Structure formats: C-alpha cells, structure tokens
Image: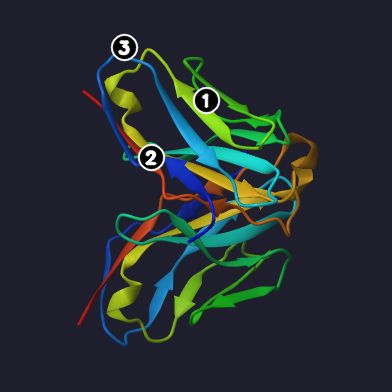
C-alpha cells in the first residue's frame, strides 16, 4: 500500500459526459501528479500540482483540468468525453517539487471506460 | 525531449532463470532513473532507483546500474519466481528542469511471464 488513495476504482460513462477523479496523496506529500495509461500511448504525464499551484504540464487535453485543494487532495476533471479517453488514470504523490531524491508513489488508479 | 526505450515483451521465462530487461534513455540534463513494477490489476510500485552515474539500485533481488556512457539502466535478476510476473517500466526524471517540476518519462513497459 503506497498511501495514495484514488476514487472511484472504476468508472463507466458515455461519450460527451463529464467525470471527476479524486486523489488523496500520502500524508505530508505536497506534490500531486496525474498520469494516463492507455494501450496506444503508454504511460503519459498529464499535470503536476505542488502545494495548491500548477507546476508542470504534459500532454493534457484542453478538455481536461485539475486542481489541488488546501487539504492537498486533488481532482482531475475530464469533460466532453470521447471513446479515446478510455484509460487507466493514475495519481502519484511526492514530498518535494523536484529533485533526484524525490520519489513518486502511485495510487491504484481509476479505470475509465467511455461507451 | 526526454525519452526512454525499453525492450518489448512479452518475456517468458522459467522459474529460477536469469532476467534482463534492457532500458536506454535520452535526456537533456542529469536524470534520475527508476524501475517501476505493475502487478496484474494493481498500480505502479517503485522497484529501485539510481540518482547519479555508476549508482546501483537494488531491491528484492533486482539490480540496475546507471551507465552514463551508454545511457542505459538495464534491470537484472538472477533467479526469477512466478511471483515476479508483472509489467516492468523504466522511467527517468530530469533534474535540469527543476523549476518546471518533476515529471516522470516512462518507457513502454515490458511484460514478464514466469512459468513454474
């Protein structure tokens, strides 16, 4: 158990809909990261928040947004869903903003299926 | 940009066989290197890491040495067990871009199947 929790575990929805994925980081970790794992794109970094502020952005679509709240939990919002958004979405957390000794710990993931 | 290339699987082995998974990288700065493992139906777990050249990461019988001259971080285990069946991901975090955060760049993953 990494200490990172994600809800829900599974999500099935229809095209055009909007969903929210939730992540609680390990106790004391200030950074939260979101990754998408799909069969065709592999594991891709989406976005990082550090202590409530966006700090790094990857291949995140404009239809997707995220935020980190004062209690440090984070939400990833996916809207106008398309079939291609079906994937496993991982949240990870780490203690620092950046640095070689900083390790990212991953949650169990949310499997999103868009029908 | 940064990239990680690892051998494609699946790799099928018998118990007690020697395992090697090749990983090479390109990076603009001084990356830290990681191996993560994903067991069926689970999230990613950190297996080992190395933060500078010639460092050797090790855990649970797995080892990998950071080779700057060959830009490689190959994963090895001397005697695999059925419980080692999983997908293994090589990843890097580039230290030169501290101000921009700490994203991990992953390889495509290598599925390993160990048969009794």
- Badge 1 element: loop
Compute the Cα span from label 1 to label 3.
17 Å
In the rendered structure, find residue A60 and report the number of the disc placed on it.
1
- Residue A69, compared with residue B74, is above or below; it is above
Q: Picture quarter containing residue A82? A: top left
- Badge 3 element: loop
Q: Residue at x 39, y 36 (%)?
A: A41
Residue reaching furthest front?
A: A71
Marked residue chain, label 1: A
The answer to which of marks 1 and 3 sits earlier in the sequence is 3
**Alpha-carbon neighbours of circle 2 within 10 Å: few (<14), some, or many (≥20)?**
many
The answer to which of marks 3 and 2 sits earlier in the sequence is 3
What residue does disc 2 label? A110
- Residue B73 picture location, percent across and down: 57, 66
What residue does disc 3 label? A16
Q: Are marks 3 and 2 on the same chain?
A: yes
- Badge 2 element: strand
């Amino acid at each position: 158990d990494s200490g990172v929790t994600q809800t829900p575990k599974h999500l099935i929805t229809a095209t055009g809909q909007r969903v929210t994925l939730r992540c609680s980081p390990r106790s004391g970790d200030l950074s939260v990261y979101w990754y998408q794992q799909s069969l065709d794109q592999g594991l891709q970094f989406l976005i990082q928040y550090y202590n409530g502020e966006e700090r790094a952005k990857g291949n995140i679509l404009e239809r997707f947004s995220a935020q980190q709240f004062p209690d440090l939990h984070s939400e990833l919002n996916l809207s106008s869903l398309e079939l291609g958004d079906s994937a496993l979405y991982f949240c990870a957390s780490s203690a620092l903003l950046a640095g070689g000794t900083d390790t990212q710990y991953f949650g169990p993931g949310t499997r999103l299926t868009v029908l | 940009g940064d990239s990680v290339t690892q051998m494609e699987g699946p790799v099928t082995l018998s118990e007690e066989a020697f395992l090697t998974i090749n990983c090479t990288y390109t990076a603009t700065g001084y990356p830290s290197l990681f191996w993560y493992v994903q067991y069926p139906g689970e999230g990613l777990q950190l297996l080992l890491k190395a933060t500078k050249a010639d460092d050797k990461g090790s855990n649970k019988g797995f080892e990998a040495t950071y080779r700057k001259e060959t830009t490689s971080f190959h994963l090895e285990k001397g005697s695999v067990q059925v419980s080692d069946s999983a997908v293994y991901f090589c990843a890097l975090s580039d230290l030169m871009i501290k101000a921009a955060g700490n994203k991990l760049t992953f390889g495509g993953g290598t599925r390993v199947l160990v048969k009794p």
